Image (spheres, helix red, strand yellow):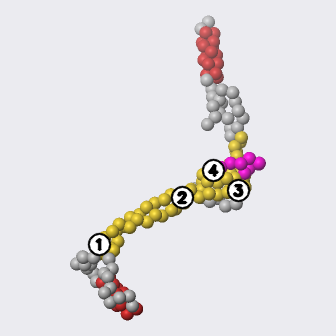
């Protein structure tokens, strides 16, 4: 007499487990190529500052002739070749800032089967872009990512 209630309990517990089972949808995936319409680089601007020695030119009392310019250029070259410039009172260190731009990504406009898309990619794809096409049926009550 006891086996009947035990079988009934097993049947009820297996029915409850069947209701809690989650169905995973299999993704239908294939790869294709899209036609690239436009690629726009996205730039990052960096600023680098370094200290440079800047010397003021002393006024030339001899006038502005070719010989005085040559003598002044030789004096400047000789001063630059000396290892110490601290003793010169007309030289100072000044910060010089330079800006650099570098591409960090690419905004790509492309078309696939008549529809236009835009994606930000790490590299320029060229004329064709390899894409992943996924098809999953819509199920009521099932959330899709």
Q: Residues within 10 Å of mark 1 (few under 14, many from 20)?
A: some
What is the CA distance from the residue labelled 2 to the residue labelled 1?
35 Å
Q: Which residue is labeled 3 in the image?
A: 37
- Segment colored magenta: 111-119
Check if residue 83 falls in the magenta segment: no
Q: Residues within 10 Å of mark 3 (few under 14, many from 20)?
A: some
Q: Which residue is labeled 2 in the image?
A: 43
**Quarter location, residue 70:** bottom left
Q: Which residue is labeled 1 in the image?
A: 92
68 to the left or right of 120: left
Please say if the residues under marks 2 and 4 sit with CB atoms less than 8 Å apart: no
Q: Earlier in the sequence, mark 3 or mark 1?
A: 3
Image quarter (top left, top right, bottom left or bottom right) of the N terminus: top right
Q: Nearer the viewer, residue 26 or 3?
A: 26
Q: Earlier in the sequence, mark 1 or mark 4?
A: 1
Q: Looking at the image, is 57 positioned above or below residue 31?
A: below
Q: Earlier in the sequence, mark 2 or mark 1?
A: 2
Mark 4 residue element:
strand
Residue at point 64%, 34% (across, down): 144
Q: Earlier in the sequence, mark 2 or mark 4?
A: 2
Residue at point 62%, 57% (across, down): 40
What is the CA distance from the residue labelled 3 to the residue labelled 1?
53 Å
Q: Which residue is labeled 4 in the image?
A: 119
Residue 60: image location, x then y, percent: 32, 85
- Extreme right residue here? 114
């Amino acid at each position: 007499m006891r086996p009947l209630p035990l079988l009934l309990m097993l049947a009820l517990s297996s029915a409850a487990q069947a209701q809690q089972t989650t169905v995973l949808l299999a993704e239908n995936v294939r790869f294709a190529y899209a036609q690239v319409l436009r690629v726009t680089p996205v730039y990052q601007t960096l600023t680098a500052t370094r200290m440079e020695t800047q010397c003021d030119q002393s006024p030339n009392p001899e006038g502005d002739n070719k010989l005085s310019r040559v003598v002044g250029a030789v004096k400047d070259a000789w001063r630059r070749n000396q290892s110490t410039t601290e003793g010169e009172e007309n030289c100072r260190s000044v910060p010089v800032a330079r800006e650099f731009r570098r591409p960090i990504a690419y905004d790509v406009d492309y078309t696939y089967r008549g529809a236009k898309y835009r994606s930000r990619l790490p590299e320029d794809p060229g004329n064709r872009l390899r894409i992943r096409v996924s098809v999953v049926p819509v199920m009521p009550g099932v959330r899709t990512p």
